[in-house]
Image: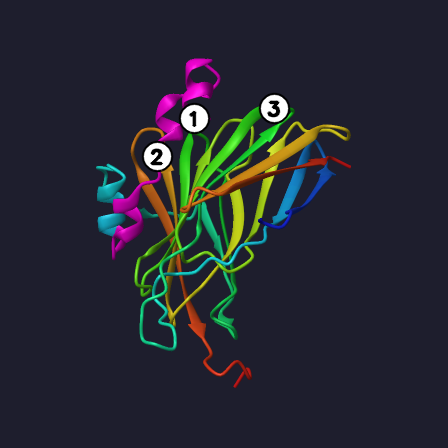
Amino acid sequence: MAGLLASAGLYPVAAFAEFNKAAFEAKTLADVLKALKVTGAPTESKDVTLTAPDIAENGAVVPLAAATTLAGVKSMLLLVEKNPSALVAMFNITDSIDANVGTRAKMGQSSDVYAVAIMNDGKALFAKKEVKVTLGGCGG
Amino acid sequence: MADPMRIRAQVAGSNATVRVLMNHEMETGQRKDAAGKVIPAWHISEVSASLNGKPVMTAEWGPAVSKNPFLQFTVKGAKAGDKVSVTWKDNKGESRTDEAVVS
């Protein structure tokens, strides 16, 4: 499908890149950005919002959302630092949607969670939050 | 065969909020079965969404997305009656597409 759409000129080819295995096997934020060929150093930004719970009672279903009000966003990433692979999901943003995406992630243990906005000019801006995972699921 | 997705698309001002619940096992590749053998990863790797046939978003997911994944995004300028379709493809090559009408 990707090839068809690209040849029909409906969509930039790069945005329909094949599943980026290297990025999804990387262990840290820096390695993920390297695998995605982002050259700029990531900087913390108030313009990026990460919505995540303070305490997740069930590590199998942690609601996460990434948003930004900035224009010129290429993609939004969600990362959980202490998972076996840091990158959870990558969303390619187009002009037709808001840079505001949400999903649910699995977390093995309490960890810092990152929302990263990769801009069209190659900059990486992030927001981070610590999410505590309660084991046993009884809310204690 | 994969079960259908549940898609709800609702107008909010000049945009539409789309919420999708997919049915998928999302096996991480980290777990072991009773015999101590690693259960191979089986997860949705690509998701794409389109409005009236025009692609609006693509996403790549790793195995860390929860079982029976939830996805929310906002489509600009969508109005009631527009068609939203969502497609996923997993790492075994299986895929599924479902459609919903914005209300």
**Residue identifier under label 3:** B53
Residue A55 place in picture, x, y as percent? 49, 72
**Residue identifier under label 2:** A18
Q: Amino acid at mark 2?
A: Glu
Q: Which portion, as a residue range, is magenta?
A: A1-29
Residue in the foreground of this view, choosing between A30 and A121: A30
Residue B2 place in picture, x, y as percent? 58, 49
Chain ID for label 3?
B
| Same-chain status of marks 1 and 2 | yes
Please check the rendered image and state whether residue A82 is part of the magenta-colored stretch, yes or no: no
Residue A72 place in picture, x, y as percent? 42, 29
Please check the rendered image and state whether residue A23 is part of the magenta-colored stretch, yes or no: yes
Tell me, yes or no, whether the two marked residues, 3 and 1, touch with CB atoms within 8 Å.
Answer: no
Residue at the (25%, 46%) spot, across then down: A22
Query: What secondary structure is found at the residue carrying circle 3?
Result: loop
Residue at the (38%, 70%) spot, across then down: A108
Residue B55 vertical position relative to residue B66 in the rendered view, above or below: above
Query: Can residue A42 be spotted in the picture?
Result: no
Query: What secondary structure is found at the residue carrying circle 2?
Result: loop
Residue at the (53%, 43%) spot, across then down: A100
Dot 1 crowding, Cα within 10 Å, few <14, some 14–19, many 20+: some
Chain ID for label 1?
A
Looking at marks 1 and 2 on the same chain, the residue that comes earlier in the sequence is marked by: 1
| Same-chain status of marks 2 and 3 | no
Residue B20 place in picture, x, y as percent? 62, 47
**Residue identifier under label 1:** A2
Chain ID for label 2?
A
